[in-house]
Image: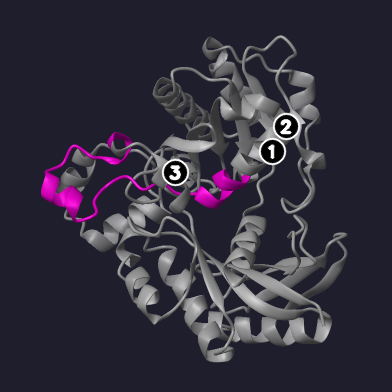
Amino acid sequence: MTQALLTLNAGSSSIKFALFPLAASIARRPALSGQIESLGAGNGARMSAVDDAGTSLIDRPLPGGTDHHQALEFLLRWLSSHSALKLAAVGHRVVHGGEHYREPVLLDETNLAELTKLIPLAPLHQPHNLDAIRALQRLEPGLPQVACFDTAFHRSQPELAQLFALPRQLTEQGIRRYGFHGLSYEYIAEVLPEHLGKAADGRVIVLHLGNGASMCAMRERRSIATSMGFTALDGLMMGTRCGNLDPGVLLYLIEQQGMDSHALTRLLYQESGLLGVSGISSDMRELLASDRPEAKQAVDLFCYRIGRELGSLAAALGGVDAMIFTGGIGEHAAAVRAEVCRAARWLGVELDAVANLATNSATNSATSTASVARISAAASAVAALVVPTNEEWMIARHTARLLQ
């Protein structure tokens, strides 16, 4: 029986998964992929999956109140009965690796304990990433598991780019800029030569735009600077997260409005961003389709903040040779790409409006490079491309390497 690698991305109410045949070279397209949504909801979770051709394999509800452990148990049973592939290992997206995890690791009790200590740095993600690992330990005790970190790619940054202007003893305690979405940026860095040739090693800014959003400046396909910092709250405005915020606002809310840490956490992570500004939705698709002025203002602010950050990262690089759009919004929202490119004309970006509107990366991000598109005009001094990301493939490759 052919062996396979399972990749998992466990969130607070969902689990995304993909199954890759284990081979000398891991294919970019998984044999199957899917997700389990609405975990813990009273009306029940739902599991869906498609094969490598996009054909539906399952789309069915699960019992109300299904938790992560029960969902993983169901997934393993379903995989064993619906796939001829035998699991050799599981690779996990783990959001925070702290200062010390610069590479993926084979998990054991020692490093699991260390990763648990990082939960306060990524409270919305880390607990669920680790819960999935613990659940699989109970379900399949002998199955190797690998953690792949969203922070690891940014450990190549210069020391100065990682520092806050805080007392040195706080820096030594680990309060520094880490950066996130590293698996996405690592994938883009891996495939850039296929689309930019030698220019891939030049000054590239990647815009990972989705419900969570960040940007990364690369030189020689290594991270030089990024918009996110100590936590995944920093930098760009996001679906429900505020992004960059004057710390004085927090002091004001504590002192004048009596908000405690729980109220601030809810405000900053769940009630701000596109949702907070619009009062309508955190979904960019809904906002772009709306004719309400609050929706337009939220979209305009989202694009404005990207433009501001673009200037900062261009300064860190000393210029820009290419801009890459990826992530759910970056791949699908032509209007957002158009506004970002318009605001970046001072950098030498000239948009091909027809190519931008024609670009529709509706295929799964784990598919081939066919949906990559150049949206800059032929005379543009800066190349602008849409490149669908593929974090699952990066996780599968890292897992395969550690198994050898």
Say which residue appears at 75% left-offset and 13% top-offset: 378
Nearest to N terminus: mark 2 or mark 3:
2
Q: Is residue 209 above or below residue 124?
A: above
Disc 2 secondary structure class: helix
Q: Which stretch did the figure color magenta?
A: 160-187
Residue 103 at x, y percent in the picture: 47, 58
Front residue of this view, candidates 150 and 37: 150
Question: Badge 2: how crowded within 10 Å, few (<14), some, or many (20+)?
Answer: some
Say which residue appears at 85% left-offset and 67% top-offset: 56
- Kind of residue at badge 1: Val
Per the image, the residue denoted by label 1 is: 387
Say which residue appears at 64% left-offset and 46% top-offset: 328
Say which residue appears at 63% left-offset and 24% top-offset: 199
Q: Quadrant of the C terminus?
A: bottom right
- How far is mark 1 from mark 3, CA to CA? 25 Å
Q: Is residue 45 left or right of residue 243?
A: right
Q: How many marks?
A: 3
Per the image, the residue denoted by label 3 is: 273
Disc 3 secondary structure class: helix
- Kind of residue at badge 3: Gly
